[in-house]
Image (cartoon, rainbow, N blue to C red):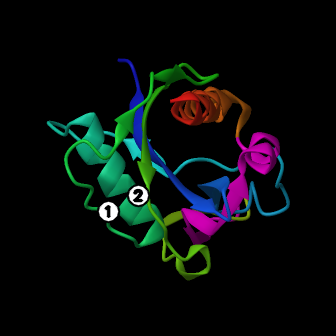
Amino acid sequence: MLRQSAGILLHRMTCGVAEVFLVHPGGPFYARRDAGVWQIPKGEFEPGETPFAAALREFAEETGFPLTPAPGEAVALDPVRQGGGKIVHAWALRGDVDAGAIVSNRFSMEWPPRSGEQCDFPEVDRAAWFTLAEARQRLLPSQRPILEQFAALLAASKEN
């Protein structure tokens, strides 16, 4: 079965410069990694859920900030296939949240490996606003096409 997830690329303008909101995955595997692991807040669909509803739910679960966009505010971007084959549906949405105030859902896993002990970790351990140039360096490579689509939308809007 094809795995699919959905997410929101939240963006804002600060002093005329576009910034995007990205999250850093929590847990021991990413604790010491930075470049190339940040992501848009996203997650898999639940049964019967529309991709956009999943994107909004996942944003709220991973950040603690529920979004309620007006119809037409969110711009659908073309789906992107990640390295493992998962399809990511994304929407660009203008907004502003306090990256330092996120509250993420949590997950449990055996840690350290083969210890028999379960440890609890946040799904997202931090978030930040990045310029497009910074985001290109930090973002998971398979999600960079989402950023490039957004950059193209920005460039097209400046031409009009």
Residue occupied by mark 2: 59
Query: Do the CB atoms of the residues marked 1 and 2 lie less than 8 Å apart?
Result: yes
Labelled disc at residue 67: 1
Labelled disc at residue 90: none
Q: Position of residue 68 (x, y in %)?
A: 25, 61
Left or right: residue 26 compared with residue 4: right
Residue type marked 1: Leu
Q: Is residue 25 above or below residue 103?
A: above
Range of residues picked out in magenta: 114-139
- Whole-number angstrom distance, CA of label 1 to CA of label 2: 8 Å
Q: Position of residue 147 (x, y in %)?
A: 62, 35
Q: Position of residue 96 (x, y in %)?
A: 49, 67
Left or right: residue 51 compared with residue 7: left
Confirm whether the magenta stretch covers residue 124: yes
Left or right: residue 74 compared with residue 21: left
Residue type marked 2: Phe
Front in this rendered view, residue 68 or 63 = 68
